[in-house]
């Protein structure tokens, strides 16, 4: 029988955590839900299918200062930060972090990302019903996939079933008041698997397929910025009255000047950039990187956010269906 | 990484008096890219400039910031200094520590702090400066002189004599201006016409001078060295090529109208020359008053009623058939390289003064009217009589400062010549009739000028004029007399004089249309509509617009010698300009970065100088700047959404650098 | 009605008059619309037009200036086209305009479709395109009263401090995805000033103030050019009420200069011209 | 509001009229508060609307743009264009929470030294009266804490 934490006890447990941690949890901002630091458990809004922006920004901020230098002295980076708890992270987003790890949490380590990752404990929240845009199962995850969190919570009538996954998780849950669950673990409805993902895209179909898709694209940065696994950045150096600062902010492969090097742009056209993006997200990627799985985790954020409905799920299906033209 | 040198000028105590120079220097040392700081007692002095020059060389400076007076004052001086050190002159920025700081703020911390910020602002801007290189353009060595008064005449003659062609434009039928209306001139009392006429004749006959009378400048385009001027020449209805100026026509013309030249104290005919010595000595037909032209209009407009007579006497009597009814107004276009503006003045209209009768009393006349009355060629052949009854005045009262030094009339300035011409009139009247007694109400006697004071005394001692310090409070008619009530403020008692004639010493005001002309020429003018010189003391006959010069009373009250001097001065300045074969253009113009231009051509729409051309590249059509026409106003730069246009010397980057320097 | 569009598109493609027809098709949610580029006649059947066709397709013309293209436009879109023609971005003869007499569209986002007309449609006074080659449907009677700016007025009811903090909150959310810019037909600079570095007008530091700088730049560059299609607001992933800024400027441009963008292509833009005698509340200080 | 509050004013002055007017104020020793920093531009029309926003964004309490009186522009039309541009911008700034009273556009001619000094004094008084301006949320940069 699984252990369970009653809804009322959940709050008191979070109170405890708040004493020593910065707790980041889903809160409702205006008409939608975003991960934001909370001061009291009441702020948490759990009636969401997923947040508009992924929790990645708490490890990999939209913009951050890498170092500053005033005259000779360089100010130390990273500065120490609090212990982090990410509460209510969805399995797909948790998986997204492990994708980021491949780049930022492995040599050469990204100091800032690594630090935050080490400081953070992830409390996952299983999805009770998939949203219309979800396709995590297609990308090798699941609504109740606990493999990438420290603690996994699954909502049931009388509380949350607690699954302690890691030592980190165990330490964190220690203070909580747990009991044996009477109700059986719920049946989670999974989104249907989209066929075609396993195949590589037919060479000859590419050019025209991508250019037609790119016709519609506005090459804005939305898809990249809402994506839990995009990590491209742009750096700039600032010099105000002699105080030099290195800033880094998110960038997107859909931007005009993406990877422009000394005036040369490898992906000059919208078509190139579009292809680049999907090859990066979909199975083409393992062939080039050998990482074994796609970097898309099927959260469906880009599907909902894209202003012109460029739907990655269609691309997945098309890549199989489309015959060479 | 730039190497900026910062030089702070004490300007004696002008800056150092309120700004702590040592602190400014200390702060400047800390500013980024500053490689050298120093101060001078007077940076603009030769030793000052030398020390800057040496410092640039010795410290391999590649930018220079000078904290001194306004850049409008010494920017060019210091650009030359910088250039003399082998540095591009446009790598200089001036922080205005005097006009904008030390002179306007008290002695204190905030003044020094401001000075420091102004320097930092300059340093930041200079960091983004780049070397600029002037272009060369050709110039037309022809001059335009606007105004045929003594100043314009002098300028035209001097320019013509230095070998350049001159176009002289005068809106009256004859040159001569106000001086021609005067009888005698102070302090020498020599006859105005006698000294002016020869010069007028010279102008009329000079091979280098094209004289356009009865004409007005209506449009000016282009820039220094290359002006294009549109001149409207009013129809004279007389062919001056065939006309010999015999005078038959104006002697026989039956239509009599008040003469402008005689200040409406005498008459002229409809076909006329303004005065005997007129140049050109050939008549024009005043179409508003000529009987035949009236008739023609009448027919044309198809009016009802009695037709005016078809006079045409002049045409019938003209021995050379010079009368040309077909002649129309015409627009003449002239290309010139420089312009002298000498549009002179007119006298203040005293009708605004109710206490002087507001123009109701015929025997209250202006100084200029008296000139005509005294003049041998005037309406009374020099016999001074009362306009009302032709009687000889025995008691004459003068009112000074009419339309001068009087805020009620919006004329706060002193017209400068009135004191002297009142003295002149007093002396002249005594000469005309020993029985005349003059009373002169004055505020101050301003007799600053060669022999002026002596002249004023002569009026009192020889001509026995009685000077009363005070203003006239009221004038009213009593029978044939004019009762003048005033105050002798020295004696502190009221005065009442029964006068036969009252003379108002009216002041000088700018000619009608001065402001309009200034706009046409793109030069500035003050609240009184007097034209503004580039610098009151140091550039008295230049304007802020290259190639346009000023002379005479259009700048402010002037007497004859000053106007003549300025005419010559303007001519000399212009000759200096013409002594070059090509002109160096200011490189501070706009320039389009074709790579960023999207070809919306908003710039073309807004440019006041049509300086934007379009350039068709292989793929697109983009904008380009014609640097000859561009005046560097930056209008297009601010309106270009793509940031594709840059204004050299005032680029977005440079200005933003200035802004960001104000916050730390 | 939709059949008219299909027939016209087919005719234009078959005759070779155009190489592409830009229109709408059903989105992947089976509910809303998305842009469609028709190159082959068989795709003509995909074309739709209904109250979910909110997108302003005129933006796409900027990518295909060289080839003759047909485009389906609503009246508001047509005004955007007028603006671009006025700004010499298109050759009229290369654009074949299929105008839609439009009763208005509804708020949509992916898999969501509102019930009521969009706010802008409720106050719309132009239901027939001001410019077209082929009109679909019958011209619609213009309703009165004319468009109001009640939303702007309401906001101006707030105190200055409230207004400032309101925008601070809104712009705190901005992630600079530049979708608002990229969807806007009025934004077509080779390189947007916001991304230029010499000088750098806007830092990549994502503070509310920097974001505000960007959004003011955007709004002001559209002053007198924005036709109020509200695409910027529709595409914003974090729902910043961007069009409020544009609406404010629209209102002022109308009030101060009596000008509305895109009514025709010849009237000079309000900031490209002036009246000598206008005062505009500027330069009125007296001692 | 603290008594010692000193508003900071950025002035954009056209070289031909207003900057000259400011010089005139100097030459005639007409004192005015030291709160203004004058940036010299060829013409009021050179001033991009975004400069003004930048000034406020960076912390200015007031901005004064000044050029030749209408009709007197050295470039004949510049100030007319400027007038339209800034009339519009002033409305937008107000909408964003920067009161109209903080952004003055006034005409000062080369001979109006007195007017210039009085203008600056009046503006400074007005701003001192109003106190510090509304900021757009946090002036401080929060990126280092890893937030937006």
Image (cartoon, rainbow, N blue to C red):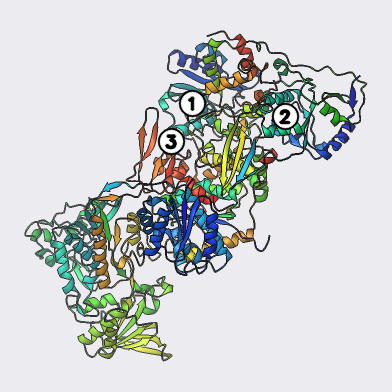
Measured as percent of width and height from the top left, residue B51 is found at 41, 60
Residue carrying label 3: B597
Q: Is residue B468 left or right of residue C196?
A: left
Residue carrying label 2: A51
Measured as percent of width and height from the top left, residue C33 is found at 61, 22
Spatial CA distance of label 3 from label 2 is 41 Å
Residue carrying label 1: C61
Q: Which mark is residue B176?
A: none
Q: Is residue D34 visible?
A: no
Secondary element under disc 3, as helix, strand or loop, is loop
Q: Circles 3 and 2: CB distance less than 8 Å?
A: no
Residue B597 sits in quarter: top left
Q: Are marks 1 and 2 on the same chain?
A: no
Spatial CA distance of label 3 from label 1 is 18 Å
Q: Are marks 3 and 1 on the same chain?
A: no
Which chain's residue wears label 2?
A
Q: From the viewer's side, name the closer residue of B177 and C133.
A: B177
Residue at (79, 20) in percent of width and height: A144
Q: Is residue B634 left or right of residue B428?
A: right
């Amino acid at each position: 029988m699984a252990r369970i934490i009653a809804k009322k006890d959940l709050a008191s447990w979070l109170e405890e955590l708040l004493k020593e941690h910065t707790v980041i949890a889903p809160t409702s901002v205006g008409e939608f839900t975003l991960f934001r630091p909370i001061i009291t458990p009441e702020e948490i809004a759990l009636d969401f299918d997923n947040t508009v922006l992924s929790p990645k920004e708490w490890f990999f901020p939209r913009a951050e200062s890498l170092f500053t230098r005033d005259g000779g002295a360089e100010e130390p980076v990273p500065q120490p930060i609090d212990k982090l708890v990410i509460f209510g992270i969805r399995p797909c987003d948790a998986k997204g972090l492990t994708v980021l790890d491949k780049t930022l949490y492995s040599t050469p380590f990204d100091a800032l990302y690594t630090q935050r990752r080490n400081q953070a404990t992830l409390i996952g929240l299983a999805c009770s019903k998939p949203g219309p845009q979800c396709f995590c199962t297609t990308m090798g995850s699941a609504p109740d996939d606990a493999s990438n969190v420290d603690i996994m919570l699954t909502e049931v009538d009388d509380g949350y079933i607690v699954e302690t996954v890691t030592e980190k998780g165990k330490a964190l849950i220690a203070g909580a008041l747990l009991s044996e669950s009477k109700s059986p673990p719920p049946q989670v409805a999974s989104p249907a698997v989209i066929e075609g993902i396993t195949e590589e895209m037919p060479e000859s179909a590419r050019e025209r397929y991508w250019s037609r898709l790119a016709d519609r694209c506005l090459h804005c940065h939305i898809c990249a910025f809402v994506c839990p696994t995009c990590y491209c950045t742009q750096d700039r150096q600032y010099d105000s009255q002699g105080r030099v600062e290195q800033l880094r902010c998110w960038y997107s492969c859909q931007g005009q000047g993406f990877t422009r090097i000394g005036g040369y742009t490898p992906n000059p056209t919208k078509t190139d950039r579009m292809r680049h993006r999907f090859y990066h997200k979909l199975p083409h990627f393992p062939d080039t990187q050998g990482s074994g799985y796609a970097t898309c985790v099927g959260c469906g954020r880009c599907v909902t956010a894209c202003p012109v409905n460029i739907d990655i799920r269609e691309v997945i299906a098309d890549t199989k269906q489309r015959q060479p033209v | 990484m730039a190497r900026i040198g910062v030089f702070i000028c004490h300007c004696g105590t002008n800056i150092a008096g309120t700004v702590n120079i040592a602190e400014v220097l200390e702060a400047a040392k800390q500013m980024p890219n500053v490689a050298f700081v120093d101060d001078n007692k007077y940076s603009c002095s030769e030793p000052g400039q030398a020390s800057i020059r040496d410092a640039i060389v010795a410290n391999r400076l590649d930018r220079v910031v000078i904290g001194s007076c306004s850049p409008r004052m010494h920017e060019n001086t210091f650009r030359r200094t910088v250039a003399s050190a082998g540095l591009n002159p446009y790598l200089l920025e001036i922080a205005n520590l005097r006009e904008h700081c030390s002179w306007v703020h008290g002695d204190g911390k905030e003044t020094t702090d401001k000075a420091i910020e102004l320097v930092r602002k300059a340093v930041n801007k200079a960091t983004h400066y780049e070397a600029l290189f002037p272009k060369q353009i050709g110039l037309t060595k022809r001059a335009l002189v606007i105004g045929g008064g003594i100043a314009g005449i002098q300028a035209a003659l001097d320019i013509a004599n230095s070998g350049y062609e001159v176009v002289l434009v005068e809106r009256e039928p004859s040159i001569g201006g106000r001086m021609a209306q005067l009888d005698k001139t102070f302090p020498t009392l020599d006859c105005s016409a006698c000294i002016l006429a020869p010069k007028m004749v010279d102008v009329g006959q000079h091979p280098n001078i094209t004289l356009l009378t009865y004409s007005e400048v209506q449009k000016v385009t282009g820039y220094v060295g290359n002006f294009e001027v549109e001149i409207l020449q009013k129809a004279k209805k007389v062919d001056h090529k065939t006309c010999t100026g015999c005078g038959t026509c104006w002697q026989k013309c039956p239509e009599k109208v008040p003469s402008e030249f005689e200040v409406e104290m005498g008459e002229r005919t409809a076909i006329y020359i303004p005065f005997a010595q007129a140049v050109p000595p050939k008549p024009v037909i005043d179409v508003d008053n000529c009987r035949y032209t009236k008739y023609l209009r009448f027919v044309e407009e198809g009016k009802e009623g009695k037709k005016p007579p078809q006079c045409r006497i002049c045409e019938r009597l003209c021995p050379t058939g010079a009368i040309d009814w077909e002649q129309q107004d015409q627009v003449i276009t002239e290309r010139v390289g420089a312009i002298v503006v000498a549009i002179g003045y007119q006298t203040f209209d005293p009708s605004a003064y109710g206490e002087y009768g507001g123009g109701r009393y015929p025997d209250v006349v202006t100084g200029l009217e008296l000139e005509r009355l005294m003049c041998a060629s005037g309406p009374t052949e020099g016999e001074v009589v009362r306009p009302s009854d032709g009687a000889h005045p025995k008691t004459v009262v003068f009112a000074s400062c009419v339309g001068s030094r009087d805020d009620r009339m919006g004329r706060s300035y002193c017209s400068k010549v009135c004191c002297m011409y009142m003295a002149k009139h007093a002396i002249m009247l005594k000469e005309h009739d020993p029985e005349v007694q003059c009373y002169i109400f004055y505020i101050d006697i301003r007799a600053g000028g060669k022999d002026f004071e002596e002249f004023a005394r002569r009026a009192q001692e020889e001509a026995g004029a009685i000077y009363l310090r005070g203003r006239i409070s009221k004038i009213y008619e009593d029978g044939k007399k004019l009762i003048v009530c005033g105050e002798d403020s020295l004696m502190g008692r009221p005065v009442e004089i029964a006068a036969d004639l009252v003379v108002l010493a009216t002041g000088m005001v700018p000619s009608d249309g001065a402001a309009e002309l200034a706009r046409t020429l793109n030069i500035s003018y003050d609240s009184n509509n007097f034209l503004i010189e580039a610098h009151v003391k140091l550039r008295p006959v230049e304007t802020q617009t290259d190639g346009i010069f000023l002379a005479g009373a259009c700048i402010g009250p002037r007497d004859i010698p000053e106007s003549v001097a300025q005419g010559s001065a303007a001519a000399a300045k212009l000759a200096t300009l013409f002594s070059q074969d090509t002109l160096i253009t200011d490189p501070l113009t706009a320039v389009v970065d074709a790579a960023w231009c999207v070809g919306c051509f908003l710039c073309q729409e807004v440019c006041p100088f049509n300086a934007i051309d379009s350039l068709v590249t292989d793929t697109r059509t983009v904008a380009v700047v014609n640097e000859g026409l561009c005046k560097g106003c930056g209008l297009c730069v601010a309106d270009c959404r793509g940031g594709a246009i840059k204004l050299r010397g005032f680029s977005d980057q440079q200005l933003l650098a200035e802004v960001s320097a104000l916050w730390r | 009605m939709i059949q008219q569009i299909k027939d016209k598109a087919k005719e234009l493609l078959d005759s070779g008059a155009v190489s592409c027809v830009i229109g709408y098709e059903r989105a992947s949610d089976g509910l809303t619309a998305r842009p469609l580029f028709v190159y082959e006649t068989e795709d003509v059947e995909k074309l739709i037009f209904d109250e979910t066709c909110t997108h302003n397709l005129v933006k796409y013309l900027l990518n295909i200036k060289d080839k003759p293209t047909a485009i389906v436009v609503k009246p508001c879109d047509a005004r955007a086209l007028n603006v671009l023609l006025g700004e010499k971005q298109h050759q009229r003869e290369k654009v074949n305009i299929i105008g839609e007499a439009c009763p208005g569209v509804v708020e949509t986002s992916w898999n969501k479709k509102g019930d009521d007309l969009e706010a802008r449609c409720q106050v719309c006074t132009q239901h027939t395109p001001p410019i077209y080659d082929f009109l679909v449907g019958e011209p619609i009677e213009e309703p009165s009263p004319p468009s109001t700016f009640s939303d702007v007025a309401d906001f101006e009811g707030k105190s200055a401090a409230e207004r400032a903090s309101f925008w601070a909150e809104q712009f705190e959310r901005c992630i600079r995805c530049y979708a608002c810019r990229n969807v806007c037909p009025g934004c077509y600079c080779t390189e947007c000033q916001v991304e230029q570095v010499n000088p750098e007008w806007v830092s990549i530091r994502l503070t509310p103030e920097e974001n505000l700088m960007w959004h003011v730049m955007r709004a002001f560059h559209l002053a007198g050019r924005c036709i109020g299609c509200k695409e910027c607001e529709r595409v914003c992933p974090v729902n910043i009420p961007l069009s409020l800024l544009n609406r404010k400027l629209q209102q002022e441009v109308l009030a101060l200069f009596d000008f509305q963008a895109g009514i025709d292509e010849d009237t000079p833009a309000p900031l490209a011209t002036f009246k000598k005698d206008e005062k505009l509340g500027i330069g009125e200080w007296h001692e | 509001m603290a008594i010692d509050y000193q508003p900071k004013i950025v002035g954009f002055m056209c070289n031909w009229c207003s900057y000259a007017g400011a010089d005139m104020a100097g030459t005639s020793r007409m004192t005015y508060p030291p709160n203004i920093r004058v940036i010299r531009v060829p013409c009021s029309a050179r001033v991009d609307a975004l400069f003004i926003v930048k000034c406020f964004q960076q912390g200015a309490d007031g901005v004064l743009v000044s050029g030749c009186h209408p009709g007197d522009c050295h470039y004949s039309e510049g100030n007319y264009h400027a007038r339209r541009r800034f009339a519009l911008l002033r409305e937008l700034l107000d909408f964003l929470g920067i009161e109209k009273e903080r952004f003055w556009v006034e005409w000062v001619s080369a001979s109006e030294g007195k007017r210039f000094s009085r203008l600056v004094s009046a503006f400074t008084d007005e701003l001192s009266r109003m106190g510090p301006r509304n900021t757009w949320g946090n002036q401080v940069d929060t990126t280092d804490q890893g937030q937006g």
